[in-house]
Image (cartoon, rainbow, N blue to C red):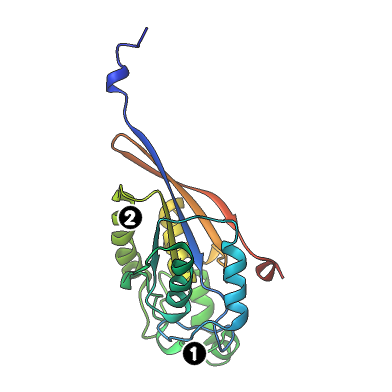
Amino acid sequence: MIPPDYKNKPEETSITIDLLRHGAPVGGVKYRGALDDPLAPEGWEAMWATVENQGPWDRILTSPLLRCAEFAKALGQRLNVTPAIEPRLREMSFGQWEGRTSAEILATDGDHLTRFWKDPLANPPPGGDNLGDVQSRLQTVWDEILLDSNSQNILIVAHGGVIRVLLSLVLLTPLNHLSRITVPYASLARIRVDRIGEVILPRLIFCGMTSENLA
């Protein structure tokens, strides 16, 4: 016998959204922000290792910066998926710190950098983006992705700061605690989004990284 409320049961669907950070760029570890350094050979290798046996994805979104977009294009060619360049996925600006290592900044602006690490929301980089503004632009693109009903498996190729903010939206982590989220080069975070009627529930279900990230 069919239950009397069967016809009124909410529709249930699920999608996966994978967040892939770019690999190591040319020039080593430093605050890059808007600097458009391409991937180093080891960065390419680490990203290919990370995506092996993952996916497949029917939609790829990427930051416009080379360290993300070039890999997204190469992966899209393998999967026969054309990546969409999404300007809102660009890295946050680090202002006067861009192009400098942590050690270099500590030597000249150490107090500000340590305050940024402890509370990045209240202590933005000099001349750089405020995290609240970064969250606002990422919130809009995230909402658009969640409302998209045409894709089942989505890959976002982006930056450490961008992925931290997106994960904070999923985990409801306050922006002043954002430094507690670690996103290594070429790491992958998987989010499952369940839709039950009008309810949209994103959940972090998987984090993966290559052996390079564990070293």
Q: Where is residue 41 in the image (x, y as percent from the top left)?
A: 60, 82
Taking the image as shown, residue 189 lies to the left or right of residue 90, namely right
Q: Quadrant of the C terminus?
A: bottom right
Specify the quadrant of the image occupied by residue 68: bottom left
Q: Residue at x 45, y 70 (%)?
A: 72
Three-letter amino acid code of the residue under disc 2: Ile
SS type, badge 1: loop
> Where does label 1 land, which residue?
99
Measuring 47% from the left and 83% from the top, which residue is drawn there? 32
Q: Residue at left 60%, top 61%?
A: 52
State which tag comes first along the sequence, 2 or 1: 1
- Residue corresponding to mark 2: 145
Closer to the eye: label 2 or 1: 2
| Residue 137 seen from this side | yes
Local secondary structure at mark 2: helix
Rendered residue at 46%/64% (across/down) = 163
Location of residue 73 in the rendering, given as x and y in whole percent from the top left corner: 43, 73
- Above or below, 140 against 48 in this view is above
**Pick the front one: 32 or 50:** 50
Residue 30, position in %: x, y? Answer: 54, 84
Mark 1 burial class by Cα count in 10 Å: few <14, some 14-19, many 20+: some
Amino acid at dot 1? Gly
Q: How far apart are marks 2 and 1 (CA)?
A: 32 Å
Q: Is residue 34 left or right of residue 5?
A: right
